[in-house]
Amino acid sequence: MANKAPFSMRQGYVRPRKIVYRDELSDELRQPIIDIIRRSASWEVLRETINRFFNPYGLDAIPKRDGPMIITHEEDAHPFQEKLNEYFVYAGIGWQMAGGKIISRGDDAFERIVQNAETELKAAGRSTAGERIENAIRSLSLRPKPDFSGAISHATAVMECVLHDITGEGITFGEYIKRCPDLFPGAMKTAFGSLWGYASEEGARHGKEGVEPPREEAEFIVGIAAALTTYLNRKHPRGCSG
């Protein structure tokens, strides 16, 4: 996932726009992406990429250019990623590049919550839970059709994973709420219970026939799960019991 906002946004030069594009982009919006790639990648990298996609068997390959071969090094990758992400934010495109992959992007609040959860879980030694968050984002990012039910399933699995690590009990999220009330003080218990109720009763978690939540609901559940998981991770460091 993206580590930080583009420079221009951090300095207040560019204001984030509402996300309005996810599935289709006009030629006008595609052209800046092509220009960024052209300016950032060497001819050799572009040639190899084109041949790999359009000439997989080595027939009629695009020839090499005369002269020294210039390879785009790893240190060039971050500026390219930053420029691309800056454009996505500027144009209101709901995607971002992270670690060389194009993944779904939510609004600023969603991104901060999810990134914090992933970072803190991995730093605390709960890497499996952190990977579950990555899986939730990957489900939101699937093309041509995102898996919103899968994203919600991974989000609730994050909760179960952390709760299992805290209590040592491998039970369902719903059972944790019943058996371990001390883990969820006050309104927190209501929040956890509502999250589980939506995921199970609405059919999103188990993918009931004909039930597919919209993106807005899936992102909301993923964000809530990330926030609640961060709370649990901070309150119950690795090795502590409930």
Image (cartoon, helix red, strand yellow):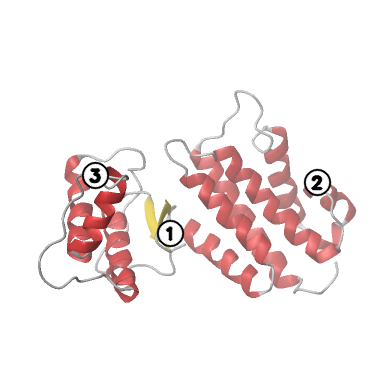
Q: Secondary structure at mark 3?
A: loop
Q: Which residue corresponds to the image point at 86% horizontal and 57% vertical from the top-left?
A: 181
Residue type highlighted by circle 3: Leu
Residue type highlighted by circle 2: Gly
- Quadrant into which the C terminus falls: bottom right
* Disc number lying in front (3 or 1): 3
User: Looking at the image, is 108 positioned above or below residue 213?
Assistant: below
Contact between marks 3 and 2 (CB within 8 A): the answer is no
Question: Where's residue 166, x and y in %?
Answer: 80, 65
Density class for disc 3 (Cα within 10 Å; few <14, some 14-19, many ≥20) is: few
Residue 143, numbered label: none
Q: If you read the primary sequence from the N terminus, does the residue marked by circle 1 or circle 2 appear first? A: 1
Please name the residue that numbered disc 2 is placed on.
174
Marks 1 and 2, how far apart at CA: 30 Å
Residue 108, numbered label: 1
Question: Where's residue 61, x and y in %?
Answer: 21, 49
Density class for disc 2 (Cα within 10 Å; few <14, some 14-19, many ≥20) is: some
Question: Where's residue 221, x and y in %?
Answer: 60, 47
Marks 3 and 2, how far apart at CA: 58 Å
Q: If you read the primary sequence from the N terminus, does the residue marked by circle 3 or circle 1 appear first? A: 3
Question: Where's residue 7, x and y in %?
Answer: 30, 72
Q: Quadrant of residue 201?
A: top right
**Left or right: 175 in relation to 222:** right
Contact between marks 1 and 2 (CB within 8 A): the answer is no
Please name the residue that numbered disc 3 is placed on.
59
Residue type highlighted by circle 1: Asp
Q: Which residue corresponds to the image point at 67% horizontal and 62% vertical from the top-left?
A: 128
Contact between marks 3 and 1 (CB within 8 A): the answer is no
Q: Secondary structure at mark 2?
A: helix
**Front residue of this view, candidates 222 and 171:** 171
**Left or right: 6 in relation to 124:** left
Residue farthest right in this picture: 179
